[in-house]
């Protein structure tokens, strides 16, 4: 049963969505991510207040997040590419496996419970955060691997990102760090991953959520809330270049600490929700 709200309450909810849009836009440019790690938790609280059933709540958050990431990641990618920092060779190798992983993951998501999606978000986010904060060097080589390994990376990035509602930037940054590539190049290239992930991911969640339309809020298209996307996406797009400017002015360690702290907070939030 979707709850009924006063105009004042809805205005505060809209303000919360706008604020999340600002944060996600900055993160998109700063870390090469689509801001999904902020968008998903915020939407989770908002949809809870609106009375969205728990069975579809996390799915709706992820699908909406992926839809929001589409314009944000495109803007971030163009800004990074204008600086000549994007590794286009890597993106070309990743294109097909990433999209394939996203399509499979988003369709499978329609058959798994919300707890599974929360668990993926919490576990993967915490592991990446701890690695970033520790400053440890998990180094496999001094350059990116060959096409078979890059293809495997791409499949994994697409699959996990589609279950978390993120643009894949965290994974891209980690892979570049493991293979001793510059962190700023990892951030820039990861912005391109967001484009590859968000478009097929949003479409997949629309399809996966179509049978559940009766449980979803008004103006939902499958597991995508059009209202949430329309309010948040333009704000994110407008502020993404600010994050790009910050990213190219920060040191490698500062970027790692900021990203690690952010991911750890998000992981703790979902751990609390699962254990409560």
Image (spheres, helix red, strand yellow):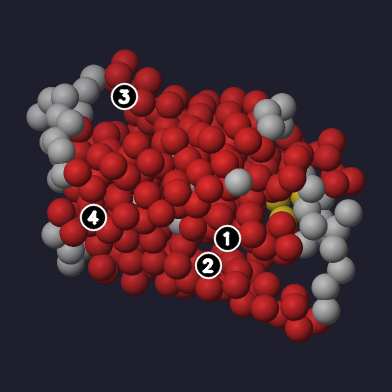
Residue closest to the far bottom: 8
Q: Report x, y in % for residue 78.
A: 37, 58
Q: Which residue is mark 4?
A: 257
- In the figure, is residue 1 to the left or right of 36? right
78 to 14, vertically: above or below: above
What quarter of the picture does the N terminus occupy?
bottom right
Of tags 2 and 4, the one toward the viewer is 4
**Badge 4 or badge 3: first in the primary sequence:** 3
Circles 1 and 3: CB atoms closer than 8 Å: no
Of tags 4 and 3, the one toward the viewer is 4
Q: Which residue is mark 3?
A: 150
Q: Report x, y in % for residue 109.
A: 65, 31
Residue 42, disc: 1
**Badge 2 or badge 3: first in the primary sequence:** 2
**Badge 2 or badge 4: first in the primary sequence:** 2
Q: Residues within 10 Å of mark 3 (few under 14, many from 20)?
A: some
134 to 150, vertically: above or below: below
């Amino acid at each position: 049963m979707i709850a009924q709200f006063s105009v004042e309450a809805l205005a505060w909810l809209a303000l919360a969505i706008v604020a999340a849009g600002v944060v996600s836009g900055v993160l998109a440019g700063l870390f090469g991510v689509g801001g999904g790690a902020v968008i998903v938790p915020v939407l989770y609280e908002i949809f809870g207040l609106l009375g969205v059933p728990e069975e579809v709540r996390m799915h709706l958050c992820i699908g909406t997040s992926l839809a929001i990431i589409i314009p944000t990641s495109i803007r971030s990618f163009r800004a990074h590419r204008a600086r000549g920092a994007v590794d286009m060779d890597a993106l070309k190798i990743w294109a097909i496996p990433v999209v394939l992983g996203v399509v499979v993951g988003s369709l499978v998501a329609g058959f798994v419970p919300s707890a599974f999606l929360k668990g993926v978000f919490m576990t993967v986010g915490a592991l990446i955060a701890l690695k970033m904060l520790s400053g440890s060097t998990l180094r496999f080589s001094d350059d990116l691997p060959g096409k078979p390994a890059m293809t495997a990376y791409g499949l994994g990035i697409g699959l996990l990102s589609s279950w978390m509602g993120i643009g894949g930037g965290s994974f891209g940054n980690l892979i570049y760090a493991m293979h001793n590539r510059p962190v700023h190049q990892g951030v820039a290239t990861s912005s391109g991953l967001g484009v590859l992930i968000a478009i097929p991911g949003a479409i997949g969640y629309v399809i996966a959520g179509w049978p559940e339309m009766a449980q979803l809020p008004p103006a939902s298209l499958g597991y995508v809330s059009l209202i949430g996307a329309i309010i948040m996406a333009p704000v994110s797009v407008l502020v993404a270049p600010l994050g790009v400017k910050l990213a190219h002015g920060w040191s490698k360690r500062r970027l790692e600490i900021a990203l690690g702290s952010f991911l750890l907070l998000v992981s703790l939030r979902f751990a609390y929700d699962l254990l409560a």
